[in-house]
DNA sequence: CAGTATCCTAGGAGATACTG
DNA sequence: CAGTATCTCCTAGGATACTG
């Protein structure tokens, strides 16, 4: 199993690269990972280690920070089960779920204008090159 | 005239603090200033120095960077008039204008859930305090 | 398994000064 | 007026190692 860092796949969350990846404009939801976490939890609760996989082996420190921040905002709920080994599940709240709409809107924009964006950049770059 | 840096007023662009200000979650449009610039140009072309005022005297370096990036993405057009003293105007393109919709959607979400957000944070903070 | 604890680095952002 | 040119600072994000 490779822990190599590659760009997140756009298949999982079409248009999201424009939200979460710092290098990609124009959109970004808050920090680098929150929007992706939101999508990962869309279909139900997930465990800490389950979240790491689709997030390309995000380091535990960064995932913890992201989850704490989202929990603080009331976007998700953390449930710790008293078992051994420990089990913790994260699940979207109604508030967190309500974010999916705006997120979709922005995603839709990105997909609808991806070609125009690429063209604009190419034109700008070729113009500033000469 | 005070050049003191204060938080951007929410009156100018309700809900936008959740897009553009790094410290404010959950939303942020790309970088710190792009969304604000978009709003500043909403009602027509503006000059470089005109933009600095509503943006709380953003430094010329940062404004230039922001405008260049937006120009590269095709969100705005830069027009330099051959006069003395020089005059340069920035104006939204159709592509840039099309961003206003998604931006409004996200703004609307923020305003609609501002109370819930504040409550969630207060609850989280008081809980983690004790 | 679900996290902490440390250390480190790149780059976004600002202050200040200067120029065509 | 409309920008560059430098310098500096901060912190989000990552690598790695360890723990209840």
Image (cartoon, coloured by chain):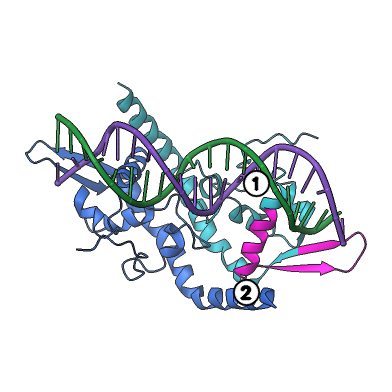
Chain colours: A blue, B cyan, C purple, D green
Residue B5 visible in the shown view = yes
Q: Marks 2 and 1, Cα distance to the nearest angstrom?
A: 33 Å
Which subunit holds the residue at mark 2? A
Q: Quadrant of the N terminus of chain A?
A: bottom left
Between A61 and A69, the residue placed more toward the observer is A61
Using the image, tell me which numbered label, if any, was put on residue B12: 1
Using the image, tell me which numbered label, if any, was put on residue A125: 2
Q: Is residue A109 left or right of residue A93?
A: right
Measuring 93% from the left and 62% from the top, which residue is drawn there? B84
Callout 1 crowding tier (Cα within 10 Å): few <14, some 14–19, many ≥20:
few
Q: Secondary structure at mark 1?
A: loop
- Which residues are drawn in magenta? B63-89
Is B65 in the magenta? yes
Measuring 49% from the left and 63% from the top, which residue is drawn there? A24
Callout 2 crowding tier (Cα within 10 Å): few <14, some 14–19, many ≥20:
few
Q: Position of residue A89 (x, y in %)?
A: 19, 45
Examine the image and state in which quarter residue A40 appears: bottom left
Q: Is residue D3 left or right of residue A76?
A: right
Between B109 and A31, the residue placed more toward the observer is A31
Which subunit holds the residue at mark 1? B
């Amino acid at each position: 199993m490779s822990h190599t860092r590659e760009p997140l796949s756009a298949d999982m969350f079409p248009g999201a690269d424009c939200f979460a990846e710092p290098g990609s404009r124009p959109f970004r939801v808050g920090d680098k990972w929150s929007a992706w976490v939101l999508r990962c939890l869309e279909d139900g609760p997930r465990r800490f280690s389950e979240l790491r996989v689709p997030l390309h082996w995000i380091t535990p420190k960064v995932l913890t920070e992201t989850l704490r921040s989202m929990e603080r905002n009331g976007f998700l709920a953390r449930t710790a089960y008293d078992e051994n080994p420990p089990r913790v599940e994260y699940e979207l709240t109604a508030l967190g779920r309500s974010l999916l709409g705006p997120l979709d809107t922005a995603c839709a924009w990105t997909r609808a204008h991806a070609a125009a964006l690429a063209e604009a950049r190419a034109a700008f770059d070729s113009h500033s090159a000469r």
